[in-house]
Image: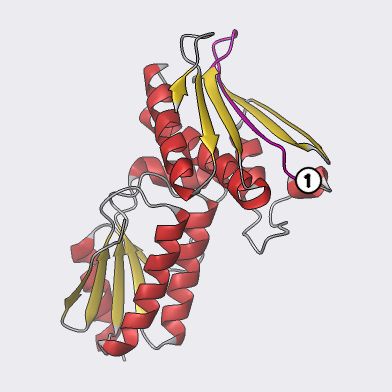
Amino acid sequence: MKQAEDNNFSISAQITCAEDVVVARQRGRTLARAMGFSPSDATLIAAAISELARNIVRYADRGELLLGKSEDGMLFVIARDNGPGIADVEAALRPGWSTSGGLGMGLPGVKRISDYFEIVSNAHGTTVTMRKRKR
Amino acid sequence: MAVPILKQGDVLIASIQSALTDVDLVALRDALVEQVASHRTRGVIVDVTALDVMDSFASRTLRDLAHMIRLRGARTVIVGIQPDVAFAMVQLGLTLENIPTALDLEEGLAFLSAVRHAR
């Protein structure tokens, strides 16, 4: 993982395996704490990053995670991949829905804790963006 | 990162020492389900004090682990869920359903002992 140059707080991480998921969520927790989030919210953000990074490994094999501080002061997470895309985004956001035998609580949970949440998905890949405000 | 599994009487204690990958979690589940038989275990304690995050995969794997071990004739207790981790689980809508939990190892052992004596 390397620091990107364009932003004080930006982190870019390639996600290709289970270990990358753990490293990414740990970086996310450290970033959240550095931005002044409480330990509880930093744990919540780490869990959200874990969900998004896992989805990359599970559904797309590889992808990228960008973490940083947005202009409005929120912490942002962008997870993007060139995988097959999500056929039914609305269903993927319903708790309990999964195409992989999973719990179906990953994306709905991330959406629930986000102050801003967006999924753009088509046959060429998926980009999930979340932002979280400090409380 | 393999999780050490200790035997104390007829109880197996898996003490997670650091953050675990999904692969590690599945390996832990399989090892415990396997070892329940070889050690004639009546109870299993999974100590998650050092677990950094409990996300949907970790919750599901622990639930599966407890259900599999129940089918093998033993009981599982999850101990040591940290306050921040509990907070995050509730916010994310994650539960361990009906798996028994306890504050720490001592309470977990007391729970298993009580279950045994109730038989």
Q: Chain of mark 1?
A: A
Q: Quadrant of residue A98?
A: bottom right
Position of residue B3 measured from the top left corner of the image (x, y, whole percent): 28, 62
Q: Position of residue A52 (x, y in %)?
A: 59, 40
Side of B102 relative to B54 (left or right): left
Q: Which residue is mark 1?
A: A86
Label 1 element class: loop
Q: Residue at x 43, y 82 (%)?
A: B70
Q: Position of residue A79 (x, y in %)?
A: 62, 33
Image quarter in which the C terminus of chain B is found: bottom left
Coloration mode: secondary structure
Please provide the residue range marked out in magenta: A69-86
Residue type indicated by callout 1: Ile
- Residue A45 position (above or below residue A17): above
User: Can the viewer see residue B95?
Assistant: no
Q: Quadrant of the N terminus of chain B?
A: bottom left
Residue at position x 34%, y 69% from top? B77
As drawn, is A99 to the left or to the right of A23?
right
